[in-house]
Image: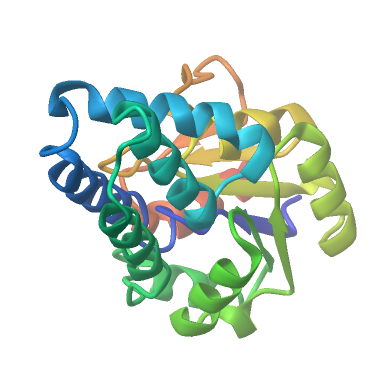
Amino acid sequence: MLTTIGFDADDTLWQNETFFRLTQERFRQRLQDHADPDHLAERLEATERRNLAYYGFGVKGFTLSMIETAVEVTDGRVPASVIGDLIALGRELLEHPMDLLPHARATVTALAKDFRLVLITKGDLLHQERKLAQSGLGDLFVGVEIVSDKTEATYRTAFDRHGTGADQAMMVGNSLKSDVIPALAAGAWGVHVPHEHEWAFEAAAAPTAHGRFHTLTDLGGLPNLIERVTRTP
């Protein structure tokens, strides 16, 4: 029995990583006159990973990591004007217009008629709330969970709070590491909908042997998948 469907937000319902990658390229361009540009991406990624424990996921932590990396690669000689530019890049990310992914609106609207929908996402609280409001999908969710990380316990708690337990729930997202694997561990179905860009931190092996694991090319196939799952004895 399936009663509840959880959705990830970034790169599942709307674009996110595409904008981060554009910002990373602008970061490289802005620093190329002050540091060796060949390894800036690797240095920035290393800083982001190191800072996740302090700042968590989201634009604000990413902006602080850009600034920290700029200081490190220039041995503290980065001009104040460059720091100002990096802050502006972060603000532009926060203010970027909402860009829903294909089939997101139609699929969420259709499924909300028959299932309890829960948004379960990581990131900055205010930023995610703003994006949800701009998406026009907010009223279709019975619950919204903006969390610091996604673990098995996260899904057990969310599906107990907003549904009828993880064993009667499905989690849909673009990240195997965050959206699928811990949801399967909690007892839910896990549906992977890959995005064209994957953040290295979210890479993981697909749990293809798991009986409740499924993968789709886009959200348009989700209603048919759910129909097959709910018909299975």
Q: Position of residue 41 (x, y in %)?
A: 27, 30
97 on left or right of 139: left
Residue at the spot 31% in from the left edge and 27% down from the top edge = 73
Residue at the spot 68% in from the left edge and 67% down from the top edge = 115
In this picture the colour scheme is rainbow
Q: Nearer the viewer, residue 142 or 26?
A: 26
Q: Quadrant of residue 219?
A: bottom left
54 on left or right of 47: right
Is residue 233 among what the camera can see? no
Answer above or below: position of 152 versus 125. Answer: above
Q: Nearer the viewer, residue 197 or 91?
A: 91
Answer above or below: position of 72 versus 233. Answer: above
Q: How many marks?
A: 0
Answer above or below: position of 113 versus 219. Answer: below
Q: Quadrant of the C terminus?
A: top right
Q: Quadrant of residue 117?
A: bottom right
Is residue 31 among what the camera can see? yes
Q: Position of residue 103 (x, y in %)?
A: 34, 66
Q: Nearer the viewer, residue 141 or 28?
A: 28
Residue at the spot 52% in from the left edge and 79% down from the top edge = 137
Q: Nearer the viewer, residue 91 or 204?
A: 91
Q: Position of residue 51 (x, y in %)?
A: 58, 34
154 on left or right of 103: right
Q: Position of residue 132 (x, y in %)?
A: 54, 75
